[in-house]
Amino acid sequence: MQDLVAKVERDFGRTDGLVNNARIMPMGQSIEVGGDTWCIVLDANLSGAFFCTQSAVPGILA
């Protein structure tokens, strides 16, 4: 993510904002979702948004 933010700032001069609009969701009923699948969902949906935000915020604040 840091490389992507750096490329955006090189190509466009700055980072104006960030939209965290990606997620994954397992198919089926929640009672059938196993622990491994749940960890993948949390990692993609929460950690993904966190690390994207963490990478973009310094440029936004500048």
Image (spheres, rainbow, N blue to C red):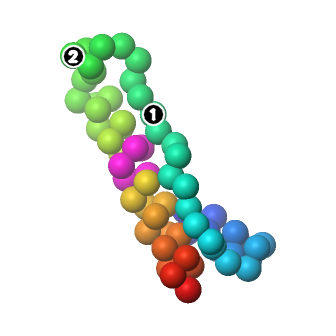
Q: Residue tagged by mark 1? A: 24
Instruction: In the rendered view, tell whether residue 35 sits above or below residue 47.
Output: above
How many residues crowd mark 2 within 10 Å: few (<14), some (14–19), many (20+)?
Answer: few
Magenta residues (range): 44-48
Task: Give the quadrant of the C terminus.
Answer: bottom right
Is 25 displayed left or right of 17 in the figure? left
- Precedes in sequence: disc 1 or disc 2: 1
- What percent of the width, then of the height, locates residue 5? 61, 69
> How far is the residue under mark 1 from the one under mark 2?
17 Å
Is 22 displayed left or right of 42 in the figure? right
User: In the depicted view, which residue is nearer to us: 30 or 16?
Assistant: 16
Magenta region's main secondary structure?
A: helix
User: In the depicted view, which residue is nearer to us: 19 or 29?
Assistant: 19
Instruction: In the rendered view, tell whether residue 54 sits above or below residue 58.
Output: above
Residue for point 63% across, 64% down: 4
SS for dot 2: helix
User: In the rendered structure, which amino acid carries the disc numbered 2?
Assistant: Ile
**Residue farthest bottom in this picture:** 62
**Residue farthest right in this picture:** 11
- What percent of the width, then of the height, locates residue 25? 41, 28
User: In the rendered structure, which amino acid carries the disc numbered 1?
Assistant: Ile
- What percent of the width, then of the height, locates residue 35? 23, 29
* 1 falls in the magenta region: no
Quadrant in the picture for residue 41: top left
Residue for point 36% across, 13% down: 28
Label annotation for residue 57: none
How many residues crowd mark 1 within 10 Å: few (<14), some (14–19), many (20+)?
Answer: few
Q: State whether residue 3 appears in this view.
A: no
Task: Give the quadrant of the N terminus.
Answer: bottom right
Q: Residue tagged by mark 2? A: 31
Residue for point 78% across, 73% down: 11
